[in-house]
Image: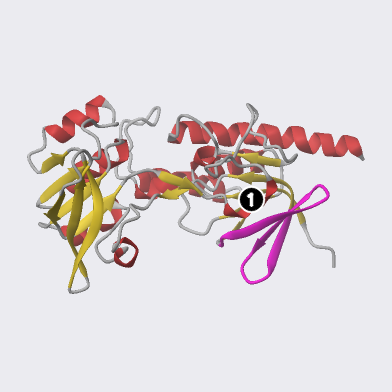
Amino acid sequence: MEKKIYDVAIIGAGPAGLTAALYAMRAGFSTVIFEGDAPGGKLVKTFSIENWPGVQDISGADLSWNMYSQVLELKPDFIYSVVKKVTLEDDIKVLHYGDSEEVRAKVLIVASGTKERLMNVPGEKEMIGKGISFCAVCDSAFYKDKDVIVVGGGNSALEESIYLARTVRKITIVIRRDVFRAEEYIQEQVLANDKIEVLRNKKPHEVLIENGKVAGLLLEDSQTGEITTLRAEGIFPYIGNIPVTAAVRDLGIVDEKGYLVVDEKMQTAVPGIIGAGDVCQKSIRQITTAVGDGAKAVHAVNDYLMSLYKKK
């Protein structure tokens, strides 16, 4: 029996992937979507979104569900699994997943997003889920009336600190420089919050562990190298992200950091492989840019499929 060949396979069901799926299905393309985690990507972990056009304020979970439900109405195929590797058979893209399962498609949209960057200090990996969390929305209830540390000075770190302040007793934000990278209005909210303290020119050195639980961080002064102790029961690192591109790194379409290299039409160097969203090499990573990428990606799908038909 001949295996089905989809018009479009999409890796990732975040804002970029779901938008691409919406446009692809509405265009009549047979579509399969791969997602190894919760649909919505990082949206699910975002407490409040205030810059989504036309909506004053919406939670990331609600916006994710709205996008996901809209796509489901069009009945694409969903495979809840991680794509381990992508290989090429002439014009066909073969997606390998599970133990030895495969899906074939004429076009592949890579919208796999990014994962959280680790602090890379002793004690960190063994304490993930045991006092180290990357999702304030998910885990804040565990730290009610307790002291926590947030590592990072960008928008995510400060926004999550504001959210945590609703529940925890005290938050200490640790930044390796003396200035934040976050937008000014978020900085103002943080600095006006009595529950939040900021330690500048400090960087993580080692996670303190007592009785199998996080007990705080050893901090290294960025200027003097002095080591100090900061006690806390939870640590939330927000220090950047790493592109999820392991499945396609052997295809010669990523840069030295692992981000997809795409042109203005979202096309990579491999015909029929298209990027969308945070996984791409770009200067701005926002929900709005991700959904824009998803829409552009399907225009590239249409152009590529038309070129295949002309070859016949």
Q: In front here: 270 or 207?
A: 207
In the image, residue 106 lies in the stretch drawn in magenta: no
Up-down relation of residue 220 to residue 289 (above or below): below
Q: Is residue 9 left or right of residue 223?
A: right
Name the residue tied to disc 1. 248
Looking at the image, which residue sits at the far right? Answer: 312
Q: In front here: 177 or 19?
A: 177
- Counting from the top left corner in percent of width and height, residue 234 is at 20, 58
SS state under label 1:
helix
Looking at the image, which residue sits at the far bottom? Answer: 211
Q: Is residue 142 left or right of residue 47?
A: left
Q: Where is the N terminus found, in terms of image quarters?
A: bottom right
- Tell me if residue 84 can be seen: yes
Q: Residue at x 54, y 48 (%)?
A: 112
In the image, residue 102 lies in the stretch drawn in magenta: yes
- Counting from the top left corner in percent of width and height, residue 155 is at 30, 36
Q: Is residue 49 left or right of residue 5?
A: left
Q: Residue at x 62, y 34 (%)?
A: 262
The amino acid pointed to by label 1 is Val
Magenta stretch, residue numbers: 81-104
